[in-house]
Image (cartoon, helix red, strand yellow):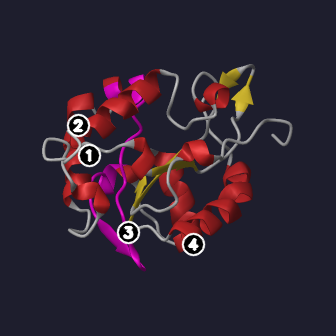
């Protein structure tokens, strides 16, 4: 995958945030094309709805992927291999150390797998979805991926909105992200 563009830039959001989202990998119609994580495809549209339901703004969060390049097979997205995840772990670990978030929210199984590898945990998404899990200096908050397939087979968009509300409620009271959009001084 060394010949593919990596998606990591200022378009990922703010490094001065309490919250990082870690998803799988850039999608070929989404961030693989736009350079913006969770943007430009149906998963990105669903992610925007989830952010909006709790008043999160992209400029106030950081969004990245466990694997920074788009893994393809026969021109289609595919799940990253263990080797590809392992190759990107040093970048992810450095990013976490630079940002020092209060909450890391994995978005899907691959993001959770990467965090499990870094912190030597063994969480399974179905067992811990939308649960705050203290790890060191942060809280891990695993979520399902907002892809159309997942929304229609595992966790509906309404269920995922409820999960995002739980995520919001687990932010520290001191977090700049806790200002609900209805009460925001700018609205």
Residues at marks 3 and 4, CA–CA distance in whole angstroms: 11 Å
Q: Position of residue 46 (x, y in %)?
A: 37, 28
Name above or below for residue 138 compared with residue 10.
below
Viewer-nearest of discs 1 and 4: 4
Which of disc 2 and disc 4 is earlier in sequence? Answer: 2
Residue 149 lies in magenta, yes or no? yes
Q: Is residue 149 left or right of residue 12?
A: left
Residues at marks 2 and 3, CA–CA distance in whole angstroms: 21 Å
Start and end of the magenta stretch? 126-151
Badge 3 vs badge 4, beta-carbon distance below 8 Å: no
Q: Is residue 57 left or right of residue 95?
A: left
Residue toward you, 84 or 9:
9
Q: Which mark is residue 164?
A: 1
Residues at marks 1 and 4, CA–CA distance in whole angstroms: 24 Å
Which of disc 3 and disc 2 is earlier in sequence? Answer: 2
Q: Residue furthest left?
A: 183
Residue located at (65% from left, 42% from top): 80
Residues at marks 4 and 2, CA–CA distance in whole angstroms: 29 Å
Disc 4 secondary structure class: helix
Which of disc 1 and disc 3 is earlier in sequence? Answer: 3
Badge 4 vs badge 2, beta-carbon distance below 8 Å: no
Badge 2 vs badge 3, beta-carbon distance below 8 Å: no
Residue that label 3 marks? 102
Residue that label 4 marks? 97
Badge 1 vs badge 2, beta-carbon distance below 8 Å: yes
Residue that label 2 marks? 53
Q: Quarter holding the C terminus? A: top left
Disc 3 secondary structure class: loop
């Amino acid at each position: 995958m060394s010949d593919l563009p990596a998606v990591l830039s200022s378009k990922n959001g703010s490094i001065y945030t309490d919250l990082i989202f870690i998803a799988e990998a850039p999608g070929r119609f989404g961030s693989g094309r736009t350079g913006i994580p969770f943007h430009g495809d149906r998963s990105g549209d669903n992610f925007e709805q989830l952010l909006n339901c709790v008043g999160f703004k992209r400029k106030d969060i950081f969004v990245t992927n466990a694997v920074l390049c788009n893994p393809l097979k026969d021109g289609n997205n595919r799940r990253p291999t263990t080797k590809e995840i392992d190759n990107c772990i040093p970048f992810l670990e450095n990013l976490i150390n630079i940002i020092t978030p209060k909450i890391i929210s994995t978005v899907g199984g691959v993001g959770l797998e990467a965090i499990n590898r870094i912190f030597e945990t063994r969480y399974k998404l179905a067992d811990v979805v939308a649960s705050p899990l203290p790890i060191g200096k942060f809280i891990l908050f695993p979520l399902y991926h907002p892809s159309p397939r997942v929304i229609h087979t595992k966790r509906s968009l309404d269920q995922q909105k409820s999960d995002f509300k739980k995520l919001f409620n687990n932010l520290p009271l001191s977090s700049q992200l806790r200002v609900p959009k209805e009460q925001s001084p700018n609205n």
